[in-house]
Image: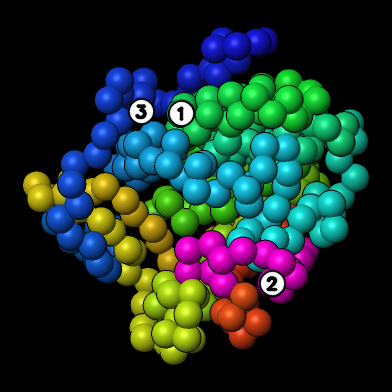
């Protein structure tokens, strides 16, 4: 497939709005976990609207760090070429969820993987494809699928590896649903690898300077961070899990944890939001968990 037809919509939320502009931010802070406050938040719709609205700005701000056909596991700059957390990828069927502009998938395709990139945001996928075309990077054209990671449009037992680099994990309240869906599409013994914000960072201010080195909140405070409009509409949501919770959710979904990484700050890496060399020398900023789907029965 080529051109516009390469982005296939299988997202149950529906088509992206013609005007993705978000209402003005009126409130930001920590709320009680879902179900304990009045009203509900549609995580898929909230995430999709936010990434649709911010795709252009986000990619412009981070183009140098992300690249168009490069694979890093987080702001610290750990590359899959060095970490090899996915193992030998040549000839393997690999699914990326929360792919964003899909530079990781492009890198994998160039290294012989049969890869599919999925994301809930059409503009993110489309912007990545356009950037690869302009840069003439990414030798292999990759299929792009717009999908909610809790409802993947793939048959069971058809994928060797599923991964995400900072996608999906912090943005859904029901993370167990994501793990169960990943387990469904993976072949028995298949690998599930994800990077996300290290749980320890939740206790510290999101500040790259010295202020970001003093804990201000409890590590165990699992209230989600939320941004809302004047009318109460959720504009952005991010969820915190402790390390214990991450492992428990994986085990409950039928996985065995096989590896855990806390990447060090790489020389020459630029500050990325609240991630910086100063903090990276002192505190872990990224957590990478590798798990294997257990054989049924």
Specify start and end residues of the magenta stretch as a single range: 253-276
Asked if residue 231 lies left or right of residue 219, the reply is left
Give x and y (percent) for residue 35.
25, 58
What's the mark number on residue 123?
A: 1
Q: Nearer the viewer, residue 50 or 93?
A: 50
Residue 228 visible at all: yes
Asked if residue 293 lies left or right of residue 89, the reply is left
Please name the predominant secondary structure of the magenta segment in the image. Answer: loop
Secondary structure at badge 1 equals: helix
Secondary structure at badge 2 equals: loop
Residue 258 part of the magenta-drawn span: yes
Crowdedness near tag 3: few (<14), some (14–19) or many (≥20) residues, C-alpha within 10 Å: some
Residue 242 visible at all: no
- Of marks 2 and 3, which one's residue comes earlier in the chain? 3
Asked if residue 251 lies left or right of residue 9, the reply is right
- In this view, the residue farthest toward the bottom is 214
Q: Could you tell me which residue is drawn at 58 percent across and 36 percent down?
A: 101
According to the image, label 2 marks what residue? 265
Q: Nearer the viewer, residue 271 or 262?
A: 271
């Amino acid at each position: 497939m080529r051109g516009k037809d390469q982005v296939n919509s299988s997202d149950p939320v529906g088509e992206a709005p013609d005007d993705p502009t978000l209402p003005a931010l009126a409130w930001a802070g920590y709320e009680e976990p879902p179900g304990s406050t009045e009203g509900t938040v549609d995580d898929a719709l909230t995430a999709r609207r936010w990434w649709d609205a911010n795709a252009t700005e986000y990619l412009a701000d981070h183009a140098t760090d992300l690249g168009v056909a490069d694979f890093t596991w987080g702001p610290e700059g750990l590359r899959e070429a060095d970490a090899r957390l996915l193992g030998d990828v040549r000839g393997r069927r690999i699914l990326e969820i929360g792919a964003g502009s899909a530079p990781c998938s492009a890198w994998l395709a160039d290294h012989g993987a049969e890869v599919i990139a999925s994301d809930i945001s059409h503009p993110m996928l489309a912007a990545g494809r356009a950037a690869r075309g302009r840069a003439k990077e990414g030798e292999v054209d990759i299929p792009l699928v717009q999908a909610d990671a809790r409802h993947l449009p793939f048959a069971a037992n058809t994928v060797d590896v599923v991964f995400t680099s900072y996608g999906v994990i912090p943005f859904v309240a029901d993370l167990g649903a994501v793990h169960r869906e990943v387990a469904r599409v993976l072949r028995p013994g298949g690998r599930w690898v994800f990077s996300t914000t290290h749980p320890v960072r939740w206790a510290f201010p999101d500040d790259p300077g010295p202020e970001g080195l003093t804990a201000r909140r409890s590590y165990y405070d699992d209230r989600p961070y939320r941004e809302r409009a004047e009318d109460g509409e959720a504009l952005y949501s991010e969820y915190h899990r402790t390390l214990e919770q991450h492992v428990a959710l994986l085990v409950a979904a039928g996985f065995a944890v096989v590896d855990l990484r806390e990447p060090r700050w790489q020389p020459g890496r630029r500050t990325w939001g609240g991630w910086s060399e100063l903090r990276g020398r002192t505190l872990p900023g990224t957590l990478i968990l590798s798990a294997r789907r257990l054989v049924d029965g």
